[in-house]
Image (cartoon, rainbow, N blue to C red):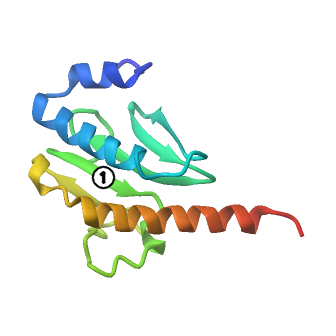
Amino acid sequence: MIKFQSISQLYDILPEHKRIIVDVLRQLISENIPEYCKEKLSFNVPYFYGNKGICIIWPSTVPGGGIKSGVFFGFWYGNKLMDEDGYLIHGKNKQIFYRIYQAVDEIDPEAILKLLQEAVSIDVMYSFSKRKV
């Protein structure tokens, strides 16, 4: 597989239902993270980061994600999130906690925004711990 230079190249290979899921997730994240946070393509998928990784969106169409169907949405430091509602799956990875969506109507924006806010708070705390006193 070629290395994508833009999100539109990723969208070109995605079936419509996965493209919609990815687009909804990207929009939720982009509209609700601070300005210092950025999005980039890493391993050909959308990856959001601030001081460290925050979250990643990996459609099964893109090789290397380890899922057979749907769209994987994971928090890079999910193991540090409270996840009081038990929304995320813990799986085999000790750090990245996630959810896999097969359809756009499975997305719970409130749950995602709550977790995203917590993930950004953790990222901000990381920037304080890096500073020399």
Residue under the image location 44 percent in, 42 percent down:
47
In percent of width and height, residue 83 lies at 35, 76
Count up the numbered dots. 1
Q: Quadrant of residue 92?
A: bottom left
When the figure is inspected, residue 28 is found, relative to residue 129, above or below; the finding is above
Relative image position of residue 36 (x, y in whole percent): 61, 46
Nearer to me, 132 or 97:
132
Q: Please identify the quarter of the rendering in which residue 10 is found.
A: top left
Of 120 and 74, nearer the camera is: 120
Query: In this view of the protein, can residue 101 be seen by the observer?
Result: yes
Q: Is residue 67 visible?
A: no
Q: Which residue is mark 1?
A: 73
Residue nearer the viewer, 14 or 38: 38
Residue 101 shown left or right of residue 82 in the figure: left
- Give the quarter of the figure containing the C terminus: bottom right
- Give the residue at x 32% y 19%: 9
- Horizontally, is 36 left or right of 62 in the view? right
Where 125 falls versus 82 (above or below)? above
Q: Amino acid at mark 1?
A: Phe
Q: Position of residue 6 (x, y in %)?
A: 41, 21
**Please, is residue 7 above or below residue 27 in the view?**
above
Crowdedness near tag 1: few (<14), some (14–19) or many (≥20) residues, C-alpha within 10 Å? many
Residue at image location 44% in from the left, 19% down from the top: 5
